[in-house]
Image (cartoon, helix red, strand yellow):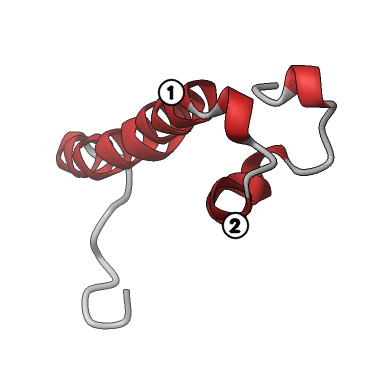
Amino acid sequence: MTKSPNVECWTPKHVIWSIGIALPFFLVWGVVLPIILLKKLISRAKSLNNPEVYAKYAFVYEGLKKERYYW
């Protein structure tokens, strides 16, 4: 902003850049990543107490009831 203070925000060009950058990141972090984690948890549902599985995925389900690991 200090090099070009006359640049206006939320012009059509700025909106296109904002959406072009923000939308893919939102889709990855807000949609794709949770779906991938859910699929991995469901596929390993019977071995959630296994030390290898626990070490990898405990940050997702630790503190939840065993029958509600996906919540």
Q: Point out which mark residue 18 bears.
A: none
Q: Nearer the viewer, residue 56 or 21?
A: 56
Q: Residue furthest top?
A: 67
Q: Nearer the viewer, residue 58 or 21?
A: 58
Q: Amino acid at mark 2?
A: Ala
Instruction: Examine the image and state in which quarter residue 7 appears.
Output: bottom left
Q: Secondary structure at mark 2?
A: helix
Q: Residue furthest bottom?
A: 3
| Image coordinates for residue 11, horizontal then vertical, percent | 24, 39
**Depicted 42 relative to depicted 37: above or below:** above
Which residue in the structure is indicated by mark 1? 39
Q: Amino acid at mark 1?
A: Lys
| Image coordinates for residue 35, horizontal then vertical, percent | 42, 24
Crowding at label 2, few (<14), some or many (≥20) Cα neighbours within 10 Å? few
Identify the residue shown where x is 19% and y is 34%. 12
Identify the residue shown where x is 39% and y is 30%. 36
User: In the image, is 5 to the left or to the right of 39?
Assistant: left
| Image coordinates for residue 27, horizontal then vertical, percent | 34, 30
Identify the residue shown where x is 46% and y is 23%. 43
Which residue in the structure is indicated by mark 2? 55
